[in-house]
Image (spheres, rainbow, N blue to C red):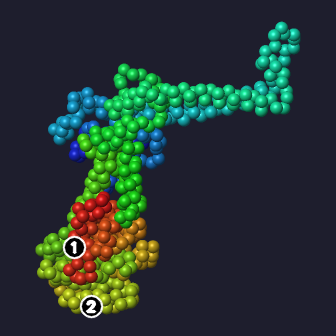
Amino acid sequence: MKMIDFACVVSKGGVVLWNQSFDHGFQRNETQDGRGTLNKLIRDVILEERGANQQASVDGVNIRWRVLHSIDAVMYIIYQGIQNAQSLEELVEEASELFLKHVKQQHENVTTINWITETIRFNFDEEFTQILYKIGSRTAKGHTTQKDQNNIQRNTTNKQDNNKKHEKTKREWGVKAFVSKKDMDELDYSTDKDARQSSATASSQNTTTNNDVNLENANKGGIGGFFRGARKSISKLFGRNKNEPPSKANSVDKASNAPSVLDTFSQMVLKYAGNMVLTPEAIEEPLKELKLNLNTKNVANDIATMICDSISAGLVGKKTASLKSVAATVREALEDSVRRILTPKEPINLLRNVSEAKANGDVYSVLFLGVNGVGKSTSLAKVTYLLKCNGFKVLLVACDTFRSGAVEQLKTHADKLGVELFERGYGKDPSAICREGLKYARANAFDVVLIDTAGRMQDNEPLMTALAKLIHVNNPNLLLFVGEALVGNDAVDQLRKFNQAIQKMAEANAELRGRRIDGIVLTKFDTVDDKVGAALSMCYITGQPIVFVGTGQRYTNLGKLEIDDVVRALTR
């Protein structure tokens, strides 16, 4: 436990209530800055619902946390390397409970605390250090003690075995006035002795069991059984009598396991009337149904699992609202989660970005990339029409030098739209063509350049390397991934590998470090009806917004994603 680097408690509004750093005598770098790592965790993991198991790794630093629902805060523990998982869980749990205890002593009603104006008035540093030392010592001692106990037990067992080998049973001979059954059994060496004893024991057990069953059935019957069932059902609804000892309550529960009418009624009240503390068991079934529904709506299975796990982690321990069922509560949490994932942190307004670049005397460049046959060239033509209708001078650059007919297809679009096409034929280096096209655009006062690239499968390493090189050399202002609304699980693999290829090439250039796909164009959106799960999968895996959706073959069939419509389609 000596490698804990940073610990803190932060309110859900972002106010740091307490923090403590630990210096281990080594040079710290940027990735070991607890505050920067914590900010990235909150932005990329917690707010994006990716922290279902309340642990994550960000920039090589490991983080565990626990949500303190009663005071609307979260405790974080940041550490490096491999640590004892059980000890870390104990540390977070004990420290959280102690911090909560102090807050409750300081404030009479913790639910009304405003952390913007309130501050903690107790010193938690020393107490946290004591907990850290105690758990670390206990872990080290536990390993040693367990090892010693194993050695002692092994030696004792060996010694007993050796004694048994050399020990001889001593028999006493003599004349007794009375011979017991035990004496007779000891002298009985017949071969069917075990069988006869087993038969006698089984007969005795059956007699006892039958008597118990008859007694239990007698106790369950009649008016007395009805009132016992009523008392049990009411105790489930309103809690066991405080004066009744636990042992007695347990014995009553064991006395009658058959569900009565009132049992069923009490379960229905708890399920639908609200004011119920949610447990993992209570929300398990509604979450299974919602996950199955997400899968049928084309959400990738891994994404659906992670979203449901995140919802479960956020709901356990909370109370349902009055007159709201568990299923309704879980569905509402799913709606909030889907809306949060689809809502962009930084919306992309293409028209505004082009206008700002034009005002600064720059040329704004957009690169379209994606797998084969998803509609990159058609989407590029639709965006061209949008930009031209808003008064911008557009240049198309044909960098698909691989697919036969790609340049001619783009030239047909350019002629119909009345814009200029920059092309150098086939077999040339796409990076060089793009560089020349951008130079030509600057020299001829174009406002925006749209770059078409060859479609490539995410597993084709040579073509992925060529794409990464094109981005590395020309550094376009906007990278738009074009994907189909029809794909399911494959969308996750496509986006992950495209991003990996871009980031791998960008590692060599400090200016491009951290470069990744900026936005998504979702094509064929008009063909999927309510199976809109690809939109959720793509936004979840990239954390980037869907900039446009294609809804037909005409140039005008380009629109924005209506988030509320997608939420309704995924949750109904």
Classify residue 526 by image quadrant. Answer: bottom left
Is the Cβ of the residue at disc 1 closer than 8 Å to that at disc 2? no
- The Cα–Cα distance between marks 1 and 2, rounded to whole angstroms, is 23 Å
Estimate the x, y position of residue 343 in percent, counting from the top left.
24, 60
Estimate the x, y position of residue 423 in percent, counting from the top left.
29, 89
Residue projecting furthest to the right: 174
Residue occupying image coordinates x 27% and y 60%: 567
Residue projecting furthest to the top: 177
Classify residue 493 by image quadrant. Answer: bottom left
Residue occupying image coordinates x 17% and y 73%: 351
In front: label 1 or label 2: 1
Q: Nearer the viewer, residue 35 or 15?
A: 15
Q: Is residue 237 above or below residue 449?
A: above
Q: Quadrant of the N terminus?
A: top left
Residue occupying image coordinates x 12% and y 74%: 359
In the picture, the disc for residue 144 is none
Tell me if mark 2 has few (under 14), some (14-19) or many (20+) residues whose alpha carbon lies within 10 angstroms of its own: few
Q: Nearer the viewer, residue 146 or 539?
A: 539
Residue type, mark 1 in image: Gly
| Left or right of 2 in this view: 438 | left
Q: Is residue 475 visible?
A: no
Counting residues from the N terminus, which is met first, the one under dot 1 or under dot 2?
A: 2
Q: Nearer the viewer, residue 177 or 373?
A: 177
Check disc 2 and report its element: helix, strand or loop: helix
Residue under pointer 1: 559
Q: Is residue 526 above or below residue 335?
A: below
In the picture, the disc for residue 412 is 2
